[in-house]
Image (cartoon, helix red, strand yellow):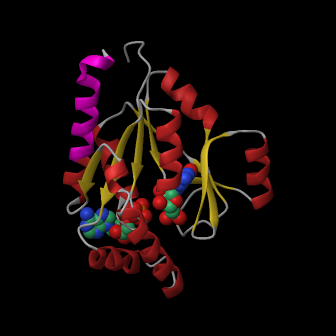
Amino acid sequence: MNGKKGLLLVLSGPSGTGKSTVIAGLMGLRDDIRFSVSATTRAPRPGEQDGRDYYFISREEFLDMIGRDAFLEHAEYVGNFYGTPAAPVEENMRAGFHVLLDIEVQGAAQVMAKRPDAVSVFLAPPSLEELEKRLRGRGTDDDERIARRLEAARRELAQADKYTYTVVNDDANEAARQLDAILTAELCRSDRR
Ligand code: ADP
Ligand code: 5GP
């Protein structure tokens, strides 16, 4: 780190597109990024760890955090609340790390309005058919939830043009390399130097 503040990277894309997979790939390529761990009221999926993947909290705790203005942004998505705790984002950026937010489109719009400096990337699936395959393949949602996530996906895909960059997650390694290239290019921008 060179004493400069890190960048804020906002990544959105329909559930099941492969955001977690591509983020893991990106974190394997660079060590100057910190993943922002969100708070959520949804139940953990098998293999998910509290404090690493999400902070799994109750509705009451979530409302309390809203009351304390502890979120950079928050939104309701498919019946659950999700929010980005503000303090760790600030601390990590001040320490010179780039902070990556994996958030849905309503929350991303809040961040882009508050932080015009943020770099925004939309991760798109190759097709809705492939998205459905990935959601089914992940095996974490029942038919009703998959239908709701696909319905949400159609609305989200219509928002892609609000983001500076769009990456199609056809091959996950290639998508991670493209994200890495976007970050590198953003760091080279004359107006950031
Ligand atoms: P998200 O975080 O966007 O909800 P995940 O990373 O959980 O999505 O990926 C959803 C499913 O799709 C997982 O089973 C994952 O292994 C698979 N997947 C991710 N990227 C790809 C890809 N490029 N090609 C095929 N399958 C993928
Ligand atoms: P999932 O339940 O599949 O982990 O996430 C569902 C959606 O919520 C995804 O689009 C994910 O990007 C989004 N999400 C995760 N954390 C946050 C957050 O802190 N804020 C907002 N607005 N969305 C989030």
| Residue 184 horizontal side relative to residue 15, left or right | left
Residue 56 location in percent, x, y?
Answer: 66, 57
Residue at 38% over, 59% down: 13
Q: Is residue 56 above or below residue 64?
A: below
Quarter holding residue 67: top right
| Residue 140 horizontal side relative to residue 62, left or right | left
**Quarter holding the N terminus?**
top left
Residue at 63% over, 32% down: 87
Secondary structure mostly seen in magenta is: helix
Q: Is residue 23 magenta?
A: no
Residue 140 location in percent, x, y?
Answer: 49, 76
Magenta segment range? 177-192
Q: Is residue 171 above or below residue 119?
A: below
Residue at 71% over, 56% down: 57
Q: Is residue 74 above or below residue 117?
A: below
Res 53 seen here = no
